[in-house]
C-alpha cells in the first residue's frame, strides 16, 4: 500500500553495502510503497557501472536539486554530511546514516540552521541502537542520569583514524577507547554511529556525557556486539533504575555494518517518509 499521495522521490548518497541494499529495496519494493528512486551518487562513479541505470546515476552531488527529491539518504561517510548536508537540506529532507558527523558542533549547528531556513527535516537513522524510543522518553521525563554504549567486534571491522589507527591489541580483547562519545567520533567515524545515535536520543546528556566504549575482540570474527547501559534516579528503597541491553548482530568478516542493521535502516527510510517535514533533528 502506498504511503499516501506519492510517489515520494528518494535519492541515495553512497553505494557501498548499505547503499546497494537500499537501492535494491527501492527498486523492488519501493513502487508498492509509493517510493521512487530518482538518483544514486557515489564518490567513485565507477562502482555504479553495470548495476545502476545511467539515468539514475548522479555524477555531481551539487546537481541533486535537478532530480527534485523529497528525501536524500546519506549512507556514505560523515564527511558528506559535514561538507554537503546543509546544501542538501535546501532541496529535501535528509536521512543521516552517519550521525557521528554531528559530534562536530559546527556541523550540527549548520544542519539545524539549514533545516529551519528551508523547512526540511533532518532524520537520523537509529541503526544498531536498541531501545532508542525508551531512551528518549526517559530523557524527556528528566530521569535519565547516565548512558553508556559499548561496541565490540573483531579489529578487522574497524575503520579507525588518528591515534586510534596506530593502536594495537595486546590480548584477545582490548578496550581501544572509553570516554565521551564526542571524543571518539572523529577517530572512529564509521564505528561510532550507534553511540552518536544514543547521544542524539538523549540530548540532556548529549555527545559530552554519553559514554562510548570501543572494544577490539578477536573472538568476534562475524559478529558486532552492542551493549547499552542506562540508569535513572533511585527509588524509595534507594536502588537506582537500570537497564542493560545486549545485542548480537551477525556480520560478514571485516564488515562495518551488521546484517540486522541493514534491515533496520530500510525501516527507518520507510518510516521517515511517513513523517511530516518538521524542521529539527529527529531520530527515525
Image (spheres, rainbow, N blue to C red):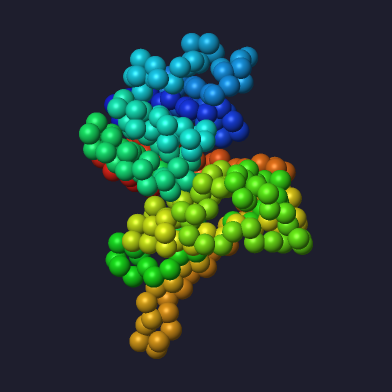
The residue at the point 33 percent across, 61 percent down is: 204
Instruction: Answer left or right for 13 relative to 162.
Output: left
Q: Kindly indicate the quadrant of the structure image that contains residue 21.
A: top right
Q: Which residue is at 42% across, 59% downward?
A: 208
Of 264 and 187, which appears nearest the observer?
187
Q: Is residue 3 visible?
A: no
Residue at 51% over, 49% down? 185
Task: From the top left corner, tell me how far across and down residue 101 is, in percent.
Answer: 45, 42
**Considering depth in this image, is 246 or 13 the residue closer to the camera?**
13
Quarter holding the C terminus is top left
Q: Residue at x 59, y 30 (%)?
A: 16
| Percent position of residue 187, x then y | 56, 47
Can you say whether 143 is above or below 258 in the image?
A: below
For the image, the number of numbered tags is 0
Residue 259 appears left or right of 114: right
Quadrant holding the N terminus: top left
As displayed, is residue 137 above or below residue 54? Answer: below
Where is 53 relative to 265, above or below? above
91 relative position to 151: left or right? left
Q: Position of residue 129 (x, y in %)?
A: 49, 53
Place residue 83 in its image quadrant: top left
Q: Position of residue 127 (x, y in %)?
A: 50, 46
Residue 63 occupies quadrant: top left
Residue 209 in view here: yes
Residue most toward the bottom?
237
Amino acid at each position: 500500500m502506498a504511503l499516501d499521495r506519492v510517489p515520494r522521490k528518494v535519492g541515495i548518497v553512497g553505494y557501498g553495502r548499505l547503499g546497494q541494499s537500499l537501492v535494491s529495496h527501492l527498486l523492488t519494493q519501493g513502487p508498492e510503497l509509493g517510493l521512487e528512486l530518482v538518483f544514486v551518487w557515489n564518490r567513485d562513479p565507477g562502482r555504479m557501472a553495470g548495476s545502476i541505470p545511467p539515468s539514475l546515476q548522479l555524477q555531481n552531488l551539487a546537481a541533486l536539486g535537478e532530480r527534485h527529491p523529497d528525501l536524500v539518504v546519506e549512507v556514505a561517510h560523515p564527511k558528506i554530511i559535514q561538507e554537503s548536508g546543509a546544501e542538501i537540506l535546501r532541496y529535501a529532507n535528509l536521512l543521516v546514516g552517519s550521525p557521528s558527523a554531528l559530534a562536530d558542533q559546527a556541523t550540527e549547528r549548520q544542519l539545524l540552521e539549514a533545516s529551519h531556513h528551508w523547512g526540511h527535516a533532518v532524520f537520523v537513522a537509529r541503526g544498531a541502537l536498541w531501545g532508542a524510543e525508551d531512551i528518549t522518553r526517559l530523557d524527556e521525563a528528566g530521569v535519565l542520569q547516565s548512558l553508556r554504549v559499548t561496541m565490540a567486534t573483531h579489529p578487522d571491522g574497524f575503520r579507525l583514524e588518528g591515534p586510534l589507527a596506530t593502536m594495537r591489541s595486546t590480548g584477545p580483547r582490548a578496550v581501544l577507547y572509553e570516554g565521551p562519545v564526542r571524543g571518539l567520533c572523529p577517530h572512529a567515524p564509521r564505528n561510532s554511529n550507534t553511540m552518536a545515535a544514543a547521544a542524539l536520543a538523549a540530548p540532556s546528556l548529549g555527545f559530552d556525557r554519553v559514554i562510548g566504549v570501543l572494544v577490539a575482540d578477536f573472538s568476534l570474527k562475524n559478529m558486532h556486539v552492542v551493549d547499552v547501559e542506562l540508569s535513572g534516579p533511585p527509588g524509595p528503597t534507594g536502588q537506582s533504575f537500570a537497564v542493560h541491553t545486549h545485542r548480537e548482530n551477525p556480520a560478514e568478516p571485516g564488515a562495518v555494518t551488521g546484517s540486522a542493521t541493514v534491515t533496520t535502516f530500510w525501516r527507518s527510510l520507510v518510516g521517515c517518509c511517513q513523517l511530516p517535514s518538521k524542521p529539527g533533528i529527529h531520530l527515525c
